[in-house]
């Protein structure tokens, strides 16, 4: 029964794939009409937009990290490069980055943790995923504690953070190029529906192959959940350790952000298998967008708040921190409860916790929730996520715009993502989706948007 539902998703993917280059010969329509259709279906501003993103997004990460350092954290204020290239490149940084990724790959391959299956692929098969992310996080934390216990120089991670980031950036370019070239020899059944246009730059950005593997390691699943996400927690912790080593100690606001963000990553890895049904895994290929996003964007932008707090904020009033904590918990509850409600409903709509909820039928077997969290707005989970992101920035006060980059970008990302998902749901569910949208009017922010 479930397989039939999922095949509907595949049909939609196939309809996009049917206009893609590897299947062009089967169509009588002329070349320019096909190219026009492909271009109409392109996302992120098409070829020009993705070309721009390939250069602009890494530049943004570099600039924000250059502007926010131990000397100052003001928009437009850059450090003086007194030591030339070594400011960007360092062998220790290369060693730290590759050791970290190798360690995470080793943990990911350990034969522990539950096995889950992805949605059916075009050829009807389902990929097997070992979901041991939470165990990997715990083992990484245990390794971190051992390093502290043995007095290893953990603060080197903070001291060389910029060079580690440059290494990760160069690596993500090279890896995406390697993946694109590797995908050129793959049959069309293995390619991502959205990254198979025949336009090299666009496919390089979107990801040409859907599920590239290296031995037993599923590269997309691995990069989505491990080195960057766990790396985010580790960088935050290294900054806390650095504060102690500098004999200042972390401020309550710094500790709070470290805990909030740690909780967020704990949650993501505890519910790791939930990612198997997201568009990142089922629809998007593994190209520059995800590779750079996972390995550079997440660990080196999401840690800006910790970096700012560590260097500049030491005296946030306790009452303000309590207020922020309460709002953060509300955001987390909205995020977690809405995600769990939908997951439970998808797994077993007759389960007592969701059986009472109102839902509308679709042409297939799936139904759409129109009450509970999913009756409040179409993306209550995004709402909770956005509330948390704002709370993390509020701990930084209002001395600089840089710690606010995360919620600003995140709102843009989720508004855009909601539109992408809505378009896909429209294709999947047609009239039922329209009915759902009429019933649940607001997209993310009730009574606002
Ligand atoms: P969702 O979890 O919202 O999943 C979207 C899918 O849910 C739809 O395609 C549809 O799939 C199903 N759905 C939508 N509406 C309904 C409904 N009313 N009833 C039942 N099913 C419905 O989206 P994401 O995968 O984008 O996000 C997952 C989580 O990850 C979110 O909490 C988000 O905030 C977070 N996130 C975090 C990011 C970060 O960088 N920190 C980045 C992106 C996301 P179907 O019908 O096929 O089941």
Image (spheres, helix red, strand yellow):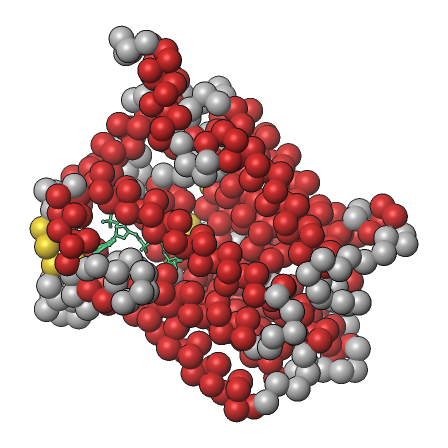
Q: Position of residue 75 (x, y in %)?
A: 68, 61
Q: Position of residue 427 (x, y in %)?
A: 22, 38
Q: Quadrant of residue 242?
A: bottom right
Mark yes or no: residue 132 visible.
no
- Quarter of the rendered image showing ligand 1: bottom left
Q: Quadrant of the C terminus?
A: bottom left
Q: Quadrant of the N terminus?
A: top left
Q: Position of residue 127 (x, y in %)?
A: 36, 40
Q: Furthest residue to the right?
A: 82
Q: Quadrant of residue 372?
A: bottom left
Q: Please tell me which residue is depicted at 80% across the width and 67% down the height of the picture.
A: 71
Q: Please tell me which residue is depicted at 22% across the width and 63% down the height of the picture.
A: 374
Q: Is residue 292 above or below residue 268?
A: above
Q: Please tell me which residue is depicted at 30% across the width and 70% down the height of the picture.
A: 337
Q: Is residue 238 above or below residue 106?
A: below
Q: Please tell me which residue is depicted at 46% across the width and 32% down the height of the picture.
A: 46
Nearer to me, 353 or 14: 14
Q: Is residue 145 above or below residue 218?
A: below
């Amino acid at each position: 029964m479930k397989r039939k539902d999922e095949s509907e998703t595949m049909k939609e993917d196939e309809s996009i794939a049917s206009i893609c280059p590897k299947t062009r010969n089967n169509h009588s329509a002329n070349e320019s009409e096909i190219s026009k259709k492909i271009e109409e279906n392109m996302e992120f501003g098409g070829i020009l937009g993705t070309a721009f993103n390939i250069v602009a997004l890494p530049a943004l990460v570099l600039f924000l990290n250059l502007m926010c350092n131990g000397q100052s954290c003001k928009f437009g204020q850059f450090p003086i490069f007194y030591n030339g290239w070594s400011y960007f490149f360092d062998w220790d940084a290369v060693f730290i980055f590759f050791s970290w990724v190798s360690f995470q790959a080793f943990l990911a391959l350990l034969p522990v943790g539950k096995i889950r299956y992805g949605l059916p692929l075009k050829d009807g098969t389902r990929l097997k995923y070992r979901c041991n992310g939470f165990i990997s996080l715990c083992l990484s934390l245990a390794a971190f504690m051992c390093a502290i216990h043995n007095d290893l120089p953990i603060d080197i991670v903070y001291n060389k953070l910029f060079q580690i980031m440059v290494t990760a950036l160069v690596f993500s370019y090279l890896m995406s190029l390697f993946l694109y070239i590797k995908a050129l020899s793959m049959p069309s059944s293995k390619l991502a529906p959205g990254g198979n246009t025949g336009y090299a730059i666009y496919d390089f950005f979107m990801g040409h192959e859907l599920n590239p593997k290296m031995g037993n390691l599923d590269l997309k699943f691995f990069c989505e959940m491990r080195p960057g996400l766990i790396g985010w927690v580790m960088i935050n912790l290294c900054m806390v350790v650095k504060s102690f080593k500098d004999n200042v100690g972390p401020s309550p606001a710094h500790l709070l952000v470290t805990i909030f963000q740690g909780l967020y990553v704990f949650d993501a890895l505890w519910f790791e298998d939930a990612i198997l049904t997201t568009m990142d895994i089922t629809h998007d290929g593994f190209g520059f967008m995800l590779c750079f996003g996972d390995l550079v964007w997440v660990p080196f932008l999401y840690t800006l708040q910790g970096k700012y707090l560590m260097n500049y904020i030491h005296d946030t009033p306790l009452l303000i921190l309590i207020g922020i904590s309460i709002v953060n918990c509300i955001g987390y509850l909205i995020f977690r409860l809405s995600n769990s409600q939908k997951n439970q409903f998808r797994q077993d709509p007759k389960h007592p916790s969701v059986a009472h909820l109102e839902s509308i039928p679709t042409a297939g077997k799936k139904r759409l929730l129109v009450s509970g969290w999913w009756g409040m707005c179409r993306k209550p989970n995004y709402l909770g996520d956005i509330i948390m992101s704002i709370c993390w920035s509020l701990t930084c006060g209002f001395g600089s715009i840089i710690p606010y980059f995360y919620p600003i970008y995140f709102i843009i990302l989720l508004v855009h993502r909601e539109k992408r998902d809505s378009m896909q749901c429209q294709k999947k569910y047609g009239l039922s989706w329209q009915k759902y949208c009429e019933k649940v009017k607001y997209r993310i922010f009730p009574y606002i948007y």
